[in-house]
Image (tube, helix red, strand yellow):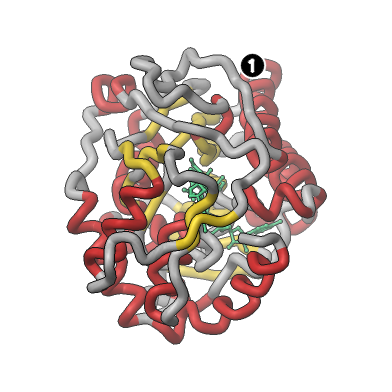
């Protein structure tokens, strides 16, 4: 049994990870989360009290972080400002949390000699052409496009430097686009599902040709547990499930499963600097650690996700109006 400190555990992927760990291992979990607009305690409701603790706080608070890291075996670092569109309008919180917050955590992990796993994104590699036969690998050079992805790239480089210069016991994973329950309605898939529920037409940026490589949040969680258990210190592992789809196809799939006409969506203003395509080659993770994704049927995964949003309106409703108002101001 290990004690895990999960930062950002009240967010989308962090909360899915906490549920996954408590259901599939005997580990204890402490979540450290600031509860920004993206954090929601409702995502952690009903967890076993003897194995789960919640602490509200900022990962850039050095005193708090030092105390919590000292009491743990493994730090699993999810906390971040995570939305590209927000980073284009107000980059500062991305620097504070993604850079200074990560620095604060790795300093504490170094001082207390604790195992550290850093959660990152495939966006650090920039984007690919639609017809490029290559996919991202651990050797792809960093080339981030947005304030979000550049701060994530910066945080990855800090972790790498702390491994080399100070012997930090760390691993890094860079994952592709996640979908599943508990995702904030600002993000593409939940935004469109909840729009349809509300009788609003889905909004596609630009022509909708951009490709994302979708993975279910539970497959991300199983990969992170495999890396914590068996990953080599200092190594980076790419996580992906061969789920490339363009945005137009995803919107049409959502419309089909929600009983709407396939063209019942609007094209809106494109995202500035919009990355064209992401694609992950996860051979290293699969060959070295024996990991495989379980949610390979995207169609069925989207149906389950639609059902979750239909059944959990209480969870997302408080965020919906203000999220759409913000998008409206931006013409999106
Ligand atoms: P999210 O925005 O849903 O959740 C982020 C969480 O971090 C929230 O609960 C928020 O309250 C918390 N947080 C923010 N700033 C904090 C601070 N200063 N101190 C403590 N807590 C703070 O994000 P997500 O989509 O779940 O992403 C989680 C992690 O996974 C991020 O590091 C992100 O870069 C990475 N990632 C996300 C995806 C994806 O598809 N969403 C893919 C690959 C990697
Ligand atoms: O690749 C991993 C990344 O995936 C993570 O690092 C980020 O934290 C996560 O937010 C996600 O980034 P994206 O920018 O790819 O996700 P988003 O859900 O914002 O958008 C997905 C695609 O859909 C993207 O091409 C933009 C487009 N889009 C988005 C919204 C919100 C639309 O066409 N319409 C929309 O309304």
- Depth check: 49 or 61 in front? 61
Quick check: can you spot residue 268? yes
Left or right: 92 with respect to 48? right
* Residue 304 versus residue 4 in the image, above or below: below
Q: Where is residue 310 in the image (x, y as percent from the top left)?
A: 32, 79
Q: Residues within 10 Å of mark 1 (few under 14, many from 20)?
A: few
* Residue 97 versus residue 146 in the image, above or below: below
Q: Where is residue 126 in the image (x, y as percent from the top left)?
A: 57, 27
| Residue at the bottom extreme, as displayed | 314
Q: In which quarter of the image is residue 44?
A: bottom left
Q: Position of residue 50 (x, y in %)?
A: 41, 73
- Depth check: 221 or 145 in front? 145
User: Residue, x 48% and y 24% (percent of image)?
Assistant: 128
Left or right: 12 with respect to 306? right
Determine which residue is flagged by label 1.
164
Q: Quadrant of residue 312?
A: bottom left
Q: Position of residue 223 (x, y in %)?
A: 33, 39
Dot 1 falls on a residue whose secondary structure is helix
Q: Is mark 1 within 8 Å of ligand 1?
A: no
User: Residue, x 55% and y 25% (percent of image)?
Assistant: 125
* Residue 14 versus residue 133 in the image, above or below: below
| Residue at the right extreme, as displayed | 92
User: Residue, x 41% and y 83% (percent of image)?
Assistant: 313
Q: In which quarter of the image is residue 286?
A: top left
Quick check: can you spot residue 112? no
Q: How many marks?
A: 1
Q: Where does the C terminus fall, quadrant-wise?
A: bottom right
User: Residue, x 67% and y 42% (percent of image)?
Assistant: 272
């Amino acid at each position: 049994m290990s004690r895990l400190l999960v930062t950002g555990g009240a967010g989308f992927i962090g909360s899915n990870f906490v549920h996954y760990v408590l259901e599939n291992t005997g580990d204890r979990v402490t979540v450290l989360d600031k509860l920004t607009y993206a954090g929601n305690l409702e995502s952690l409701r009903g967890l076993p009290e003897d194995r789960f603790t919640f602490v509200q706080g900022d990962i850039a608070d050095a005193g708090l972080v030092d105390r919590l890291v000292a009491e743990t075996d493994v730090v699993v670092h999810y906390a971040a400002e995570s939305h590209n569109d927000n980073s284009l309008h107000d980059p500062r919180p991305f620097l504070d949390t993604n850079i200074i917050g990560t620095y604060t955590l790795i300093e504490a992990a170094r001082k207390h000699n604790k195992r550290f796993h850093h959660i990152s994104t495939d966006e650090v590699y920039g984007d690919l052409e639609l017809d490029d036969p290559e996919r991202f690998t651990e050797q792809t050079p960093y080339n981030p496009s947005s304030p979000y992805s550049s701060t994530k790239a910066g945080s990855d480089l800090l972790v790498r430097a702390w491994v080399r210069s100070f012997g930090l016991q760390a691993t890094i994973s860079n994952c592709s686009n996640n979908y599943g329950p508990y995702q904030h309605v600002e993000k593409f898939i939940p935004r469109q599902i909840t729009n349809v529920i509300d009788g609003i037409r889905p909004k596609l940026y630009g022509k909708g040709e951009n490709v994302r490589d979708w993975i279910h949040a539970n497959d991300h969680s199983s990969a992170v547990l495999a890396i914590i258990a068996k990953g080599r210190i200092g190594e980076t592992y790419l996580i992906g499930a061969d789920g490339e789809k363009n945005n137009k196809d995803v919107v049409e799939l959502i419309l089909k499963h929600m009983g709407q006409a396939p063209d019942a969506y609007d094209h809106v203003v494109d995202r500035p600097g919009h990355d064209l395509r992401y694609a992950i080659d996860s051979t290293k993770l699969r060959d070295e650690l024996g990991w495989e994704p379980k949610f390979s049927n995207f169609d069925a995964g989207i149906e389950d996700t639609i059902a979750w949003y239909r059944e959990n309106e209480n969870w997302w409703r408080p965020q919906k109006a203000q999220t759409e108002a913000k998008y409206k101001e931006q013409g999106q």
